[in-house]
Structure formats: structure tokens, C-alpha cells
Amino acid sequence: MKLPPTAIKTLRLLAALALAAGGVWLLRFAARDLLRPMPPPPAGAPEGLISVPATKELDLTTVVPRTLWTTFGGLAPERTEETLPMPVEQARAEVAARLAAKGWRALSGELPLNQAHLLTLAGGEVYATPDQAFAHVTVTAGPSGGSRVRTFLLRTEGAEPIDPAAPPDADGLSLLVQSAARLRPERQLPRWMAAPCLGSALTTQLIQRRGGTAFYLTALVPGTPAETLTRVGEAAAAAGWVREHSPIDALRPAGAPAPAAVATFVYRNVACNVRAVAGPRAGETTLVYRFTDDEVYVRPPRKEKP
């Protein structure tokens, strides 16, 4: 049986689950953070360039509340992971049968084509549960020939209310923006970190890696990329951030041309890379913030000659 129109409209809000739970939106930029952090300048770099890691006064795993480690429209999913001692295809069949027995219903056949395509990019399947939650389930190869099953469960309590009179093809992005604007997840960040973040946080994601941590935040705000980045710079400066003269475009996908609206700011040992590009709707800009606690380098103290 097909989902009722109101449930389909709710799912449009939760289309971010298919994107962010699988990491499609942020992993375009975040994949490199699963590797080592950016190296320091090579030996012989001109005087005035950074040279040694800054003292780690601020640790993003402590600074960023755990409730913001993964959010979509201000809602936080429940994440679970297990390993099954069987090949991937067998594990997928096992998981599908297990979830069907629990009353979970796969939704890939009930979504609009564009959202189904995004689900394909994210991998796995999205389910509706009997208690009106939504889950994104992926099965991938695990250690020793087994399979790893990851589940992101998003409960709809607190989600943006759906107007029954709205058309079934209501804009999911608008619902996501409304939910983020109502819940304002970025307000949980410390003031110095929240200050440069314009608008409301549509998605947040924290990634721990060897040597440090990266925290991503995305927002959608009115204005052009250049105007928006100017506002970001003003807000950052007021909160004590220092702008780097040569921005590090750590948010540019490999092979893509460097965008004009990009900037890097530093606050103690935390760097903030900001990328502003034209948004999906006319007159808006998409902002992607990347905070890191291990990519600020400073000049070592000069040794006095005897």
C-alpha cells in the first residue's frame, strides 16, 4: 500500500536523511578528512609562512556538543552499527527480511525519481517504521569477509509540521530550511564558533580523524556569494577571528575550479574554511563551513644567537 500524501510530504523534509546519512552532500568535501590533515609548508618556505602546529588549546570533539555531531534540519538521528558474519549480498537479504518482519517498509519505490536517484547515490535503502520514524540502512563489506550494517534512524517528533493543504510535491528544501530555522541547532555552539555561521544550520557533521577533528555546517542564506562572504567576514572579525590573506580552499572537490567566494579564518588553533556558492534557488547562497582543530600552523620562536 502506498504512503498517504501527508507521509510523502513529511518524507520530503526527511530527504536530507538520504543525503546526509549517506554523506552525499558533505562527503563531497569531507572524504579527505578521513585521511591525515593538511601537511605543513615545505622546508625553505618564505619567512612569514606557518611552520609548526599551533598548541591545541581547543578540541572540537569537546567544543561541539555531541547533539550536533550529525543533524539534518535540526534533528539528530540515532546511529547504530553491527557486523554480520556473511557476504554483503547475503547480509542485505538477511537485513531486508529482518526489517520486514519488524514492520519496516522500504520506500525506494514510493519516492519521486529525483529523490530515488539521490538515494541511489547515498547507497542503501530508506524505510518507514511503524512508529512513524524514517531510517536509512546501508550494508557494506566489513572485516574478515563479513558485512557492516549501519542504521540512521530519524524520529519525526519535532520535525516541521506539514500543512495537509499543501500540494504533495511541496518543496522539501523549504521544509528543511523551516525546520532548521525553528530549531536553530547552531545556537548550541559556543559564541565564537557560532558567530561566523549565518542563517540556520541545515546540516552538521563532525568527523574524527588521526590527529584532529573536522566539523562541517551548511546553511542557505539570501544574497550573492560575494555579499554573503563579506557578511561572514564581518561577523567572524567581531568574534575575534583573524582572516588569512591566502585562503585555503579545503572545500573544493578534486578537479573543480576554485570558486571566487572562499575564505579562511583562524581563532587560536581552530581554522574555519568557508565556501559560498550560488544556492539551489534564485537569490540565495549556499554556505559550507569547515572547522578544523589541527590545521593552524605558527612560526616557532626565534632562537637568540649566543
Image (cartoon, grey):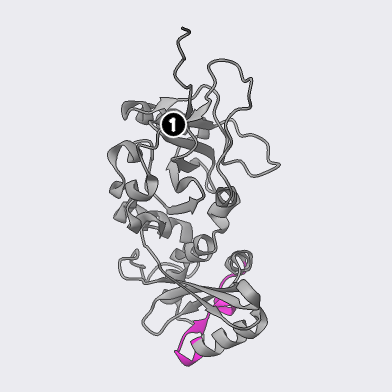
Q: Is residue 197 magenta?
A: no
In the rendered image, the vertical position of residue 295 relative to residue 61, given as above or below: above
Quarter holding residue 45? top right
Q: Position of residue 211 (x, y in %)?
A: 49, 45
List the single residue furthest toward the bottom: 101
Residue type (three-letter) at the residue carrying disc 1? Ala
Residue at numbered disc 1: 54
Q: Position of residue 256 (x, y in %)?
A: 68, 41
- Can residue 171 be seen by looking at this rendering? no
Q: Residues within 10 Å of mark 1 (few under 14, many from 20)?
A: some
Q: Is residue 100 magenta?
A: yes
Secondary structure beneath disc 1?
loop
The front one of 93 and 195 is 93
The front one of 91 and 234 is 91
Quarter holding residue 293? top left
The front one of 43 and 174 is 43
In the rendered image, the vertical position of residue 58 relative to residue 132, given as above or below: above
Q: Which residues are magenta?
A: 99-113
